[in-house]
Image (cartoon, helix red, strand yellow):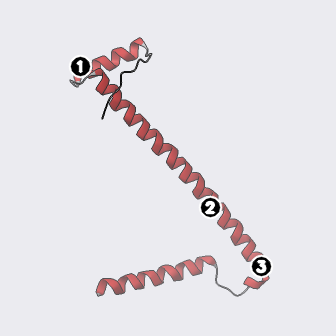
Amino acid sequence: MPKRKVAIAISDWLLEDVDEWAAQTKTSRSALIQEATAEYLSRTRKRVHDEAYQRDALAAIEDMKRIAREYADDPASEGEPSSLEVLRRLRGTSRETAGESDSE
């Protein structure tokens, strides 16, 4: 992959740390900064993704709770199984189906 030279401003103390670590690990300053930057970007992107996923999951849970309240208040739903009962039934059915395919 082609590389470009860039100029950056960096604190003296940080440059000293970078140079010391580069010498200890027998790598170049550029390689060390490139690796550190790539790792930082990877971690930051993952954190942002995880936070968005958690935010979306919590919003979905709140939506499900709202729908459950509305469903519970609906007189037409009387006598129908709860969503928990339906999920348990589905989970049991999927386990039975998985067990059948395992034994084939």
Number of other residues with Cα within 10 Å of mark 2, as a class: few under 14, some 14 to 19, many 20 or more = few
Which residue carries the number 1 mark? 23
Of the numbered discs in the image, which one, if any, rests on residue 103? none
Where does residue 71 sit, x and y in percent of width and height? 72, 75
Q: Nearer the viewer, residue 35 or 76?
A: 35
> In the structure shown, which secondary structural element does the residue marked by tag 2 occupy?
helix
Which residue carries the number 3 mark? 74
* Three-letter amino acid code of the residue under disc 2: Ala
Q: Nearer the viewer, residue 81 or 17?
A: 17
Alpha carbon separation for disc pair 2 and 3: 21 Å
* Three-letter amino acid code of the residue under disc 3: Asp
Which residue carries the number 2 mark? 60
Where does residue 98 sit, x and y in percent of width and height? 38, 81
* Three-letter amino acid code of the residue under disc 1: Ala
Where does residue 88 sit, x and y in percent of width and height? 53, 79
Q: Residue at x 47, y 39 (%)?
A: 44
Q: Nearer the viewer, residue 5 or 32?
A: 5
Marks 1,3: beta carbons within 8 A: no
Q: Is residue 9 above or below residue 70?
A: above
Q: Residue at x 42, y 81 (%)?
A: 95
